[in-house]
Image (cartoon, grey):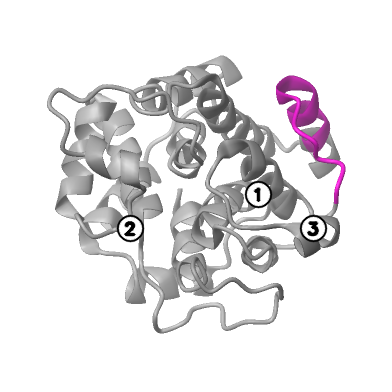
Amino acid sequence: MVGAIIGDIVGSVYEWEWIKTKSFEFFNDNGFVTDDSVCTAAVADALLHDRPPDLALQDWCRRYPDASYGGSFGSWIWMEPPRPYDSFGNGAAMRVSPAAYLNRNGDLSDALEASDLVTAVTHDHPEGIKGARATVHAIWLAFQGETANGIRKAIAETYGYDLSRSVDDIRPGYRFNEICQTTVPEAITCALESDGFEDAIRNAVSLGGDSDTLAAIAGPIAEAVHGIPAEIQTEAEDRFIPADILAVVREMYGTGA
């Protein structure tokens, strides 16, 4: 989960100022938590405390009304009662990492069930469900010690995503978009091709797309594969992560199925 939040912070600076290079200041003073982090905290809160996911998401997002929500989701935050809206946006995948983390010592089916539970309240389109599941599946496999090639093969076969391209293959023609179909496979590739957590985040931002969300998807996969260097996590917690989100992070990391 904290890998998603760090990816969000690092990528936030470049969400609308796209870059095509891995050479950039990792923690920019202008970095901040966006909707990716807020929604990830909400999902963790829902799963930790058995809260209805839709109400947890609305509660957290109303606390952070200016967190750069997408148009449809921004309206959904205030919907009474909340109903899913057939979305296949990449918000399905960027917030779902707690479902994998909390079930990392259990069965894959439990992780995927949790993924569906927290996704279907908004992103109930089959591609939205699939994008979230693929992200959770990749994180869960990484926690089992599966190799990058093994994860790549399993995700490609299970979800039909093209994971054959390298980051260098993807980067030149990649453009900003906000849908699972052309965000999730690319983010997974960024994580699996990396030689460390920081490298995975740099890969994701360097695509020149929806950088905070790409990095928020790649980040927790890379966290499970590589771990997060202590100095990176400490800087994120000390400088960027709000206290209420940090409290949920620390609670979640003391819990596991």
Q: Residue at x 48, y 38 (%)?
A: 89
Q: Position of residue 204 (x, y in %)?
A: 65, 60
Label 3 residue SS:
helix
Q: Quadrant of residue 24?
A: bottom right
Q: Earlier in the sequence, mark 2 or mark 1?
A: 2
Q: Position of residue 35 (x, y in %)?
A: 35, 53
Q: Is residue 33 visible?
A: yes
Tell me if 199 is positioned left or right of 248 in this view. Answer: right
Label 1 amino acid?
Ala
As for residue 126 lying within the magenta part, the answer is: no
- The residue that label 3 is drawn on is 167
Tell me the quarter of the image containing the C terminus.
Answer: top left
Any mark on residue 187, and which?
Answer: 1
Q: Residue at x 68, y 33 (%)?
A: 141
Tell me if 50 is positioned left or right of 40 in this view. Answer: left
Tell me if 39 is positioned left or right of 86 in this view. Answer: left
- Is residue 45 depicted above or below 245 in this figure? above
Mark 3 → mark 1, Cα distance in angstroms: 9 Å
Label 3 amino acid?
Val
Q: Earlier in the sequence, mark 3 or mark 2?
A: 2
Tell me if 131 is positioned left or right of 188 in this view. Answer: left
Q: Quadrant of residue 210?
A: bottom right
Provide the residue span drawn in magenta: 152-165
Label 2 amino acid?
Ser
Mark 3 → mark 2, Cα distance in angstroms: 27 Å
Single out the mark in the foreground, 3 or 2: 2
Task: Give the camera-side residue of 62 and 236.
Answer: 62
- The residue that label 2 is drawn on is 68
Q: Position of residue 44 (x, y in %)?
A: 34, 38
> Mark 2 and mark 3 in contact (Cβ < 8 Å)?
no
Disc 2 residue crowd, few under 14, some 14–19, many 20+, Cα 10 Å = few
